[in-house]
Image: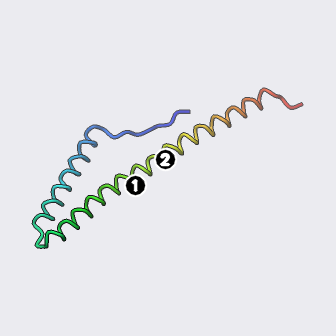
Amino acid sequence: MSHYQPKGTNAWNLFTYFNFAVAAFMMGVGIWSLEASFSAKGYYAMAALMLVYSTAAITKAIRDKDESDRIYNKLDDARTERLLSEASTHEVV
């Protein structure tokens, strides 16, 4: 039994990196041109960086859980197949 793992294309990866760069640039320009004190700008900049980091971290955590579930399911399927093959070789009279 094979498991299909969809992968992003190079175009999609380039598109997502480009979007991230544009969004980060726009956020930086917005914070820079904000009519606020330097400490307020620093607060918004730190909040933006933390939001980016936490988004990447939660995405990685979800992906890691999905991959670990796939491995567990593969092991469980292998055990079931082994039990079925052993049961089929031991005919019950």
Numbered circle sitting on residue 22: none
Callout 1, which amino acid?
A: Ile
Query: Could you tell which of marks 2 and 1 lies nearer the N-terminus?
Result: 1
Choose between 49 and 11: the one closer to the eye: 49
How was this image coloured?
Answer: rainbow
Q: Position of residue 51 (x, y in %)?
A: 30, 60
Q: Where is residue 24 in the image (x, y as percent from the top left)?
A: 20, 55
> In this rendering, would 21 be left or right of 74?
left
Q: Which residue is labeled 1 in the image?
A: 58
Q: Which residue is labeled 2 in the image?
A: 66
Callout 2, which amino acid?
A: Asp
Q: Where is residue 92 in the image (x, y as percent from the top left)?
A: 86, 32
Determine whether the residue tagged by mark 2 lies in a helix, strand or loop.
helix
Choose between 7 and 70: the one closer to the eye: 70
Relative to residue 28, is residue 14 depicted above or below? Answer: above
Q: Separation of disc 2 and disc 1 at Cα?
A: 12 Å
Relative to residue 93, is residue 25 depicted above or below? Answer: below
User: Residue 82's quadrant in the figure?
Assistant: top right
